[in-house]
Amino acid sequence: MPKMKSHTGMGKRVRVTGRGKIVAQQAGLRHNLEKKSSHRTRRLTGTVEVSKVDTRRINKLLGR
């Protein structure tokens, strides 16, 4: 049986906390920032916990 390989692209996009939660950057802060209000861009900074629906899929891609 070959070794299980983790999805390297997913590993660059998410981070696993000490308690096993998966956190990622919020979407919508890469381009077209002129038309977005400063309130919205401030709200989108930082990382948030990934939704419960996506955690199972991401854990599988990370080989966990």
Image (spheres, rainbow, N blue to C red):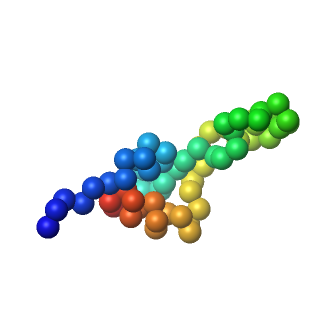
Asked if one can make out residue 54 in the rendered structure from this viewpoint, the answer is yes
Question: In the visual, does 19 lie left or right of 36?
Answer: left
Question: In the visual, does 24 lie left or right of 15?
Answer: right
Question: In the visual, does 61 lie left or right of 49?
Answer: left
Q: Name the image quarter holding residue 6.
A: bottom left
x and y percentages locating residue 29 in the rendered image: 69, 38
- How many numbered circles does the render carry? 0
Asked if one can make out residue 15 in the rendered structure from this viewpoint, the answer is no
x and y percentages locating residue 52 in the rendered image: 56, 66
Question: In the visual, does 25 lie left or right of 7?
Answer: right
Decide which of 4, 38 is in the foreground and name it.
4
Residue at image location 66% in from the left, 36% down from the top: 30
Decide which of 23, 13 is in the foreground and name it.
13
Residue farthest top in this picture: 34
Residue farthest left in this picture: 1
Image quadrant holding the N terminus, namely bottom left
Residue at image location 56% in from the left, 57% down from the top: 50
x and y percentages locating residue 44 in the rendered image: 70, 42
Residue at image location 37% in from the left, 47% down from the top: 8
Decide which of 45, 6 is in the foreground and name it.
6
Image quadrant holding the C terminus, namely bottom left
In the depicted structure, whether residue 62 falls above or below residue 40: below
x and y percentages locating residue 4 in the rendered image: 24, 60
Residue at image location 56% in from the left, 68% down from the top: 53
In the depicted structure, whether residue 33 falls above or below residue 17: above
